[in-house]
């Protein structure tokens, strides 16, 4: 299915008068809005290939129908999303779920859809068909050298796949760890993992980055070999200048101060990127901004301040990607909502009066500091984001247009009711 430009233009025409009133009011109240809009236009959020299907839990999975059955269909879905918001111009692939059969055809399709290939993701948390050795007791940390070698070779293969597609980074997330005390030697597990990562790092092309992703727990519940940002930073520092820490918002223990973590990683030049989602209890993989929108804003507040201090380009200085599981929602609707929430938090952070905040901080005026941040957070910036979409040729109201065009119903007609996205 494709969305025609005239369908977007018709909706925008119908909404133009109401939108113009909103944006005119904001322009009259907030200086420098054009600068914010231009930054929003440049800002692109990568969509993971595995987010196009209905997720699930260990208790069950309930497909909504019309799920993409191939890599090509996943790219078509992201192309639809990008048509609607012009903020989703990248796709992140998961290997071996998304191995292309024809690289030239896949790259051509990406060009047609206005997409680029973001970070490649390796998979050593599952055993694949015909795999000689099992990852039941870990991959890069495994006490068995043959298992470690297999996991290393897989990651190097993922790099090769990425080179063929024009990607420039590798994300390594490990399920390695232990479920019970005494199950493994912590120091040996760390050393095995480091040595394995060093072999993978040595295979990186010159311009590539390696993102070392951490997670506090799950699937192991006693220890995780890359369990927090400190361990990830330790690996990244030991590996070299092309290695960075990747922050998944759901991969922390409850009440972790994620905004402080990203600030310090950015200060050290070791923050590589983000996996955006939201949570109530743990790694819930919920829609970004659905549970803790103020935290999301505070994270972006630190990012904008820190990136500006280093003279970094907001759009390209870090990797930006959604990583969520849509158990009870239409996946595309969920992604529309997530992208909107991320853009809201980013635009609000751009509106913070940095000079006034710095002065209040130096004066130890705690009340003033809080007022500056919360005043911006309470500002409705949705019209600014809509204006950025309008100037990019996207929809003023992506979710409304998606529903009015019955996109999911059309996908079900094309693909069937009982479909499962590859990898899920």
Image (cartoon, grey):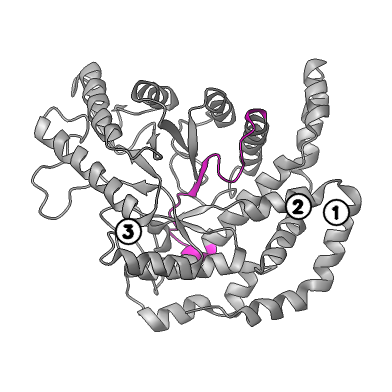
Secondary structure found at label 1? helix
Q: Residue furthest right?
A: 28
Disc 1 to disc 3, C-alpha distance: 46 Å
How crowded is the residue under tag 1: few (<14 C-alpha within 10 Å), some, or many (20+)? some
Q: Is residue 367 above or below residue 22?
A: above
Label 2 belongs to which residue? 381
Question: Which quarter of the picture shows residue 338?
Answer: bottom right
Label 1 belongs to which residue? 26
Label 3 belongs to which residue? 60
Q: What residue range appears in magenta?
A: 309-333
How crowded is the residue under tag 2: few (<14 C-alpha within 10 Å), some, or many (20+)? some
Q: What residue do we see at 82% from left, 19% from top? A: 365
Horizontal and vertical percent position of residue 50: 38, 57
Q: How many callouts does the rendering have? A: 3
Which of the pair 307/68 is nearer the observer? 307
In the image, taking residue 247 as reference, residue 308 lies left or right, namely: right
Q: What residue do we see at 68% from left, 63% from top? A: 389
Horizontal and vertical percent position of residue 247: 47, 36
Decide which of tag 2 and tag 3 comes sooner along the chain.
3
Decide which of tag 2 and tag 1 comes sooner along the chain.
1
Decide which of tag 1 and tag 3 comes sooner along the chain.
1
* Residues tagged 2 and 1 counted as in contact (Cβ below 8 A): yes
Q: Is residue 151 above or below residue 77?
A: above
Q: Which one is in front in this view, the residue at disc 1 or the one at disc 3? A: 1
Q: Is residue 313 in the magenta section?
A: yes
The C terminus - image quarter = bottom left
Q: Is residue 61 in the magenta section?
A: no
From the image, give the main secondary structure of the stretch colored magenta.
Answer: loop
Secondary structure found at label 2? loop
Disc 2 to disc 3, C-alpha distance: 38 Å
């Amino acid at each position: 299915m494709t969305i025609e430009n005239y369908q977007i233009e018709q909706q925008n025409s119908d909404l133009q008068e109401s939108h113009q009133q909103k944006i005119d009011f904001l322009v009259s109240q907030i200086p420098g809005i054009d600068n914010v809009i231009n930054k929003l236009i440049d800002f692109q959020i990568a969509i993971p290939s595995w987010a196009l299907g209905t997720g699930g839990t260990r208790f069950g999975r309930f497909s909504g129908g019309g799920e993409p059955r191939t890599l090509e269909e996943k790219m078509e879905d992201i192309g639809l999303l990008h048509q609607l918001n012009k903020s989703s111009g990248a796709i992140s692939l998961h290997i071996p779920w998304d191995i292309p059969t024809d690289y030239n055809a896949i790259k051509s399709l990406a060009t047609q859809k206005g997409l680029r290939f973001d970070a490649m993701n390796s998979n050593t948390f599952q055993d694949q068909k015909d795999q000689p050795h099992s990852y039941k007791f870990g991959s890069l940390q495994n006490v068995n050298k043959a298992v470690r070698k297999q996991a290393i070779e897989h990651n190097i293969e993922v790099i090769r796949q990425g080179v063929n597609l024009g990607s420039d980074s590798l994300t390594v997330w490990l399920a390695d760890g232990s479920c019970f005390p005494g199950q493994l030697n912590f120091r040996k597990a760390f050393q095995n993992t480091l040595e394995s990562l060093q072999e993978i790092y040595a295979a990186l092309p010159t311009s590539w980055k390696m993102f070392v992703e951490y997670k506090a727990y799950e699937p192991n519940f006693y220890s995780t070999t890359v369990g927090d940002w400190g361990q990830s930073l330790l690996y990244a520092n030991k590996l070299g200048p092309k290695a960075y820490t990747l922050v998944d918002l759901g991969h922390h223990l409850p009440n972790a101060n994620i905004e402080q973590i990203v600030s310090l990683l950015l200060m050290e030049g070791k923050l590589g990127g983000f996996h955006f989602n939201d949570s109530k209890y743990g790694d819930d993989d919920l829609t970004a901004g659905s549970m803790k929108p103020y935290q999301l804003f505070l994270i972006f507040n630190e990012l904008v301040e820190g990136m500006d201090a280093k003279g970094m380009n907001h759009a390209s200085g870090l990797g930006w990607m959604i990583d969520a599981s849509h158990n009870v929602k239409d996946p595309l609707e969920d992604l529309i909502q997530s992208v909107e929430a991320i853009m809201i938090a980013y635009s609000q952070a751009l509106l913070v009066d940095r000079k006034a905040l710095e002065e209040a901080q130096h004066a130890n005026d705690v009340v003033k500091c809080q007022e500056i941040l919360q005043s911006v957070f309470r500002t409705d910036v949705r019209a600014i984001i809509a204006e950025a979409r309008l100037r990019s040729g996207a929809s003023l109201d992506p979710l409304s247009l998606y529903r009015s065009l019955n996109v999911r119903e059309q996908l079900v007609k094309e693909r069937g009711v009982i479909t499962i996205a590859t990898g899920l």
